[in-house]
Amino acid sequence: MVKPSRLHVPKTPARPGEAPDFGYLRLSAAGAVARPDPGAPMPETRYLSEELVRVLDDGHRAVGPWNPGLDAKQLQAGLRHMLLTRVFDDRMQRIQRSGKISFYMRSFGEEAVSVAMAMALEPDDMLFPSYRNQGLYVVRGRPLLDLMCQLLSNTRDMCKGRQLPVMYHWAEGNIFSISGNLATQYPQAVGWAMAAAIKGEDTVAVSWLGEGSSAEADFHHALLFASVYKAPVILNVVNNQWAISTFQGYAGGERQSFAARGPGFGIAGIRVDGNDFLAVHAVTRWAAERARTGRGPTLIEHVTYRAAAHSTSDDPARYRPKDDYDQWPLGDPVDRLKQHLVGLGEWSEDRYAALVAELEEHVASSWKEAVKHGTLTEGPRLDPGLMFEDVFKEMPPHLHRQEAEMRAGLEE
Amino acid sequence: MAVAQMNMIHALNSAMDVMLGRDPSVVVLGEDVGYFGGVFRCTEGLQRKYGESRVLDTPIAEGGILAAAIGMAVNGLRPVAEIQFADYIYPAYDQIVSELARIRYRSAGEFSAPVTVRTPCGGGIRGGQTHSQSPEALFAHVAGLKVVMPSNPYDAKGLLIAAIEDDDPVIYFEPKRIYNGPFDGDPGKPAVPWSAHPKGEVPNGHFTVPIGKAEITRPGNDLTVVTYGTMVHVSDAAARGLGLDAEIIDVRTMVPLDTDTICDSVARTGRCVIVHEATRFAGFGAELSATIQEQCFWKLQAPILRVAGWDTPYPHAFEWEYFPGQARVARALKAVMEAA
């Protein structure tokens, strides 16, 4: 007998009190996935969207055709950038708890996605990040002081007090303003890339979103426009398994990979071990070469894990097992790159401890400098008249009147 | 400068032609705007003249069109995006409201997106509830957008060039009922072409009509009618029909609003009727009315009245009962004149 249709509700693998279960994850062995030529037509790359590109094996050796062949110096720089991102995140999280900043979002566990990609791209490639890509700023060299002043909305705040913490921007560093609304940056990156193609420039646009926000219409618009106009863009789905409390199955990840959305639009899709610095670097190079040589866009799914809370406003203990991350089969990106370097004889626990101490000191001294320019609760403060500027290029009469009205109110 | 007789379609086409020719960063994109020249023919011939990568046909995805235009603008282009009907603009609303309007603000001026969004609005063309709307108030309410609606070919061209050259985003509404000729609100009368109207004479080359300036299209002393788009012509006809010496003000730009021109006039006449085709409740007329009473209260001799579309969707079979035509405008004009 044929069963009647019943609503399927995605099953979350494990909730608090249950044992972590990552049986749903499809893994490939390190080195096992073939690397097609970056110029290969999309149908010849289709398998990449279902396999998992990995370079570091269980013994932390770099194996297989995707090994990007980075030298020890580059690997050490990658480790440093990831570690600085993590130390910075940890410190800002603690400071948020103390009330000096209103809000924070860590990228703990996902550092390789931003750091390896930024290192594999060219400095004039334009980045359209989500709110969990602070590693991009670290690699491109924005001083932590500037990021901290944004978090504090203080007198040196790049956003002039208008944006939530972590919604950075950096025109000079080619990093676009973070919206705070999800996925909106994705099709904008495609438009940026279309303009580069219209102008005949060989720069590439790159954007990121979480697997949760890939449910937004903007995701589909981005893939469609990227495909239709063969835009030189790299679109990244950071599949960190969780959208606040909601498991990736609710974004459509239960039956098919997110990377497989690429071939559905005629775009190459790659599923990569997002905690494998070398693999992320390698697929980024592959996609960037493809984009730069007129072969169009690539969709990359980074399989990773959001080891921290979504933000300082939620407690993961309420929706997932406490030891979930300990059981995550793809390990920790910082630890894996460190072990790889140790195996190469290019790193040691002592050097690691010294680096951590150095970076913690750097973060602490940057913070000391940042708070001199004010905090959310203690002066000096920005002039509130700044709220009326930049609504338009030239302030129209009604905003002049409102600013005068506000100032009169302050003087009462 | 040489002038030509143009209807609004020709004038809009001429504005884009001039700008595509002058500025290599200008691109035009939208559904059916390329090969076909647009469903209302506003982009006719532009793709042939400027090529497929400057006049782009797009997928049917208004949110995608706006997002792509934003990204292009951030990368140094000046996109003119067409949304085929204002009624189709809502899939792009998030990209307009949350993104386009605020990119300069949220990045403290480091990034900006000078996008012009052209979209035909208004009814009177048997378009039913999905091809007749006038959603200008939904955009005028958003900080960071300039909002424009011309009422004749001359202004259409001058304002569109000004919009494209503006460094801020502009939502540019085109009242489609008057694309081909001014319309006094009586669908039974034979159509009048723009060639019979002084504003149908338009310079061929580059000129601008400033954004943020209203125009007194007919000076008068009895009362002030504040209106825009198609209703400029309907209001004018209604006032003439009553033999009133009405001052008609074409708002032209909702944001930034030229309150000086409007309030100076009302302070002089002491009487005011506001006319728009969009629904009344929380419509742009409410903003006009509130502003006028704040500035002109002691000069007013009668309550400010509004004439607008009824607060219903735009019904296909009852279009002319819905449309705020001459009779409704005339009733309000009389009521304002008869008040103490």
Image (cartoon, coloured by chain):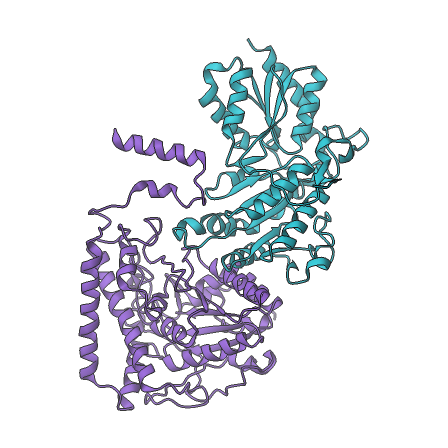
Chain colours: A purple, B cyan
User: Residue B86: which quarter of the image?
Assistant: top right
Is residue A332 visible to the viewer in this orientation of the structure?
no
Residue farthest along the right direction in this orientation: B190
Q: Position of residue B268 (x, y in %)?
A: 53, 16
Residue farthest along the top direction in this orientation: B340
Q: Position of residue B176 (x, y in %)?
A: 69, 40
State how many labels appear.
Answer: 0
In the picture, measured across the screen, residue B38 lies left or right of residue A300, that is right
- On screen, residue A160 above or below B208: below
- The image quadrant where one finds the C terminus of chain A is top left
Q: Nearer the viewer, residue A26 or A338?
A: A338
- On screen, residue A331 above or below A103: below
- The image quadrant where one finds the N terminus of chain A is bottom right
Q: Position of residue A221 (x, y in %)?
A: 56, 61
Q: Name the residue rendered at 25%, 66% in the picture.
A: A88
Is residue A158 visible to the viewer in this orientation of the structure?
yes
- On screen, residue A75 above or below B118: below
Q: Name the residue rendered at 54%, 61% in the picture.
A: A191
Q: Position of residue A43 (x, y in %)?
A: 60, 80
In the picture, measured across the screen, residue B309 lies left or right of residue A163, that is right
Q: Name the residue rendered at 24%, 86% in the picture.
A: A347
Q: Nearer the viewer, residue A330 or B162?
A: B162
